[in-house]
Amino acid sequence: MEQRKRILYIEDDTDLQWLVSHVLESAGFEVRVCSSGAEALLGIGELSPDLVLLDVMMPGMDGFRVLRELRARPECAALPVVFITARSPHGDEYQRSGAQGLIVKPFEPSALVQQVRAYLGELVTV
């Protein structure tokens, strides 16, 4: 039996936490939600995620800082991180940060699943 892919979703909005978790779990993923960057940094080793979905605008520590701190850890240096945000991209800001990509809110649930599968390198059929 194939092990489910693990997603760490870092988001401070509880409605979005529920929606994204529900959509991805329904698609067969294991999802862990953290409400802040600090919480995620403390618990990331416990989950060993295959992919991190990271909000940009959060209180205390924004997504760019969380990503920098993840990249500073040898065990997270190559971990795929995708920003998921309503904030408009400014030039190549997201790519320069070291993120693998960007998912823009609002999104269609089916499109979210397809994008996550693509970032995980899973075959996506149209």
Image (spheres, grey):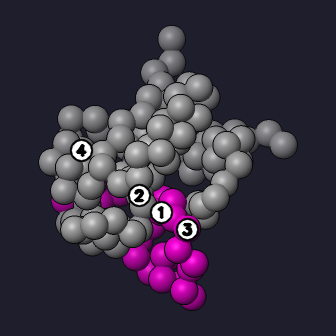
**In what element is the residue under mark 1?**
strand
To which residue does mark 4 refer? 44
Does residue 104 belong to the magenta stretch? no
User: In this picture, which residue range is highlighted in magenta?
Assistant: 73-99
Q: What's under tag 3, amino acid-wise?
A: Ala
Q: What's under tag 4, amino acid-wise?
A: Ile
Q: Describe residue 69's horizontal placement relative to residue 25 as left or right.
A: left
Say which of 113 and 80 sits in front.
113
Earlier in the chain: of badge 4 and badge 2, it is 4
Do labels 3 and 2 touch, CB within 8 Å? no
C-alpha gap between disc 1 and disc 3 = 10 Å
Q: Residue furthest right?
A: 126
Do labels 1 and 2 touch, CB within 8 Å? yes
Q: Image quadrant of residue 76?
A: bottom left
Q: Tell me which residue sits at (48%, 63%) in the image.
A: 83
The mark lying in front, picked from 3 and 2, is 3
**In what element is the residue under mark 2?**
strand
Residue 1 image point, x, y percent = 51, 11
Earlier in the chain: of badge 3 and badge 2, it is 2
Does residue 96 belong to the magenta stretch? yes
Q: Image quadrant of residue 71?
A: bottom left
Earlier in the chain: of badge 4 and badge 1, it is 4
To which residue does mark 3 refer? 86
Earlier in the chain: of badge 3 and badge 4, it is 4
Q: Tell me which residue sits at (41%, 68%) in the image.
A: 56
Label 4 neighbour load within 10 Å: few <14, some 14-19, many 20+: some
To which residue does mark 1 refer? 83
C-alpha gap between disc 1 and disc 2 = 5 Å
**In what element is the residue under mark 3?**
loop
Q: What's under tag 2, amino acid-wise?
A: Leu
Residue 54 circle label: 2
Q: What's under tag 1, amino acid-wise?
A: Phe
